[in-house]
Amino acid sequence: MDYEFFSGFTPRIIEVANRNKHVWEVLNYQIVRERTGLHSLGYVYEGEGVLQFDGEERTLAKGSLFQIWPGEPMLLTSSKSEPLHFYSFQFQYRTVYWDGGEMHSRESSGKLPLQLRSVGSEQLAIESAFRRAYELWSEKNNGYDWYVKLQLFNALQMIHQLGPITEDASTSEFAVRKAIQYMKSNYKQELTRDRMADHVSLSPGYFSVLFREHTGISPIRYLNKIRIDHAKLLLRNSAHSIKQVAEESGFVDSFYFSRLFQKETGMSPRDYRKS
């Protein structure tokens, strides 16, 4: 999962829809869009249908997950004998990121970085999250938009936890987890990308690609985040000098440490300690 992306993912829910037999009868069993205008994340809880989108044709049935994003032609067709029933979050989003002490955001139109796998044994839990979101949206009680947003995040987390499709996917995830554990145990040492790659028996280039796929950031940036978090602990709970804090956190150069700390937190190590 691209955690870096989702840490800045800021959605605005437009609607939570429930497409059922009655809706399909009105629409003559087809939804046609020359150009889609919203993001949609859907879960099929009954029936059958076919989604033509992004140059692909996909059969939908109970337990299917699908997503749609803006700017593409779409044709969604329901079976007449077994009408398609699905819940969907329809939303816009921006990605928020921090540069030092300043917050920025980007308007986003591409698809979410999700692998929509078979729901398997998680079917009831995922269906419950989508159904509850629809109920909250329909009831319109105080704070409903906030609670619906929480259900969207809950659904995203469960989708991420679905079992991997292939043995290769499982192996790569294991390698990334092993590398992260290695960082957590050895962050005070001089760790390079090559050394981390060697620890998980991968080439440096392939290791970097896999690591970014699973975390959203490079191995070195992940390592530095671990080091910065340890530095925060020392700044709060010790009387160490900034130079000592840097060294205890794995930074050889205290000036580089201070610049990186400022970039990650928006304040200097000294200001962080005072705060």
Image (spheres, rainbow, N blue to C red):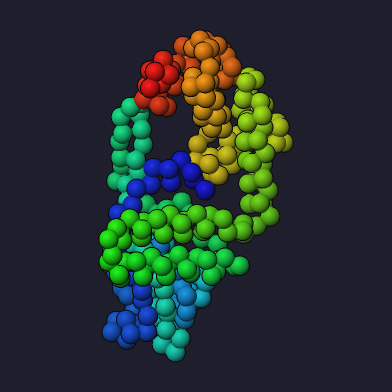
Q: Is residue 4 above or below residue 156?
A: above
How far from the left and from the top, in percent, is residue 185? 66, 29
**Residue at the bottom extreme of this rendering:** 81
Q: Residue at x 52, y 48 (%)?
A: 1
Apparent side of residue 82 relative to residue 187 in the rendered image (left or right): left
Apparent side of residue 242 relative to residue 162 in the rendered image (left or right): left
Q: Residue at x 65, y 20 (%)?
A: 189
Q: Residue at x 46, y 59 (%)?
A: 155
Q: Residue 52: name its quadrant.
A: bottom left
Q: Is residue 268 above or below residue 19?
A: above
Q: Can residue 253 be seen from the camera position used here?
A: no
How far from the left and from the top, in percent, is residue 150? 40, 55
Which residue occupies the foreground of this view, 72 or 115?
115
Q: Residue at x 29, y 58 (%)?
A: 143
How far from the left and from the top, in percent, is residue 215? 53, 41
Task: Assign the C terminus to one quadrant of the image.
Answer: top left
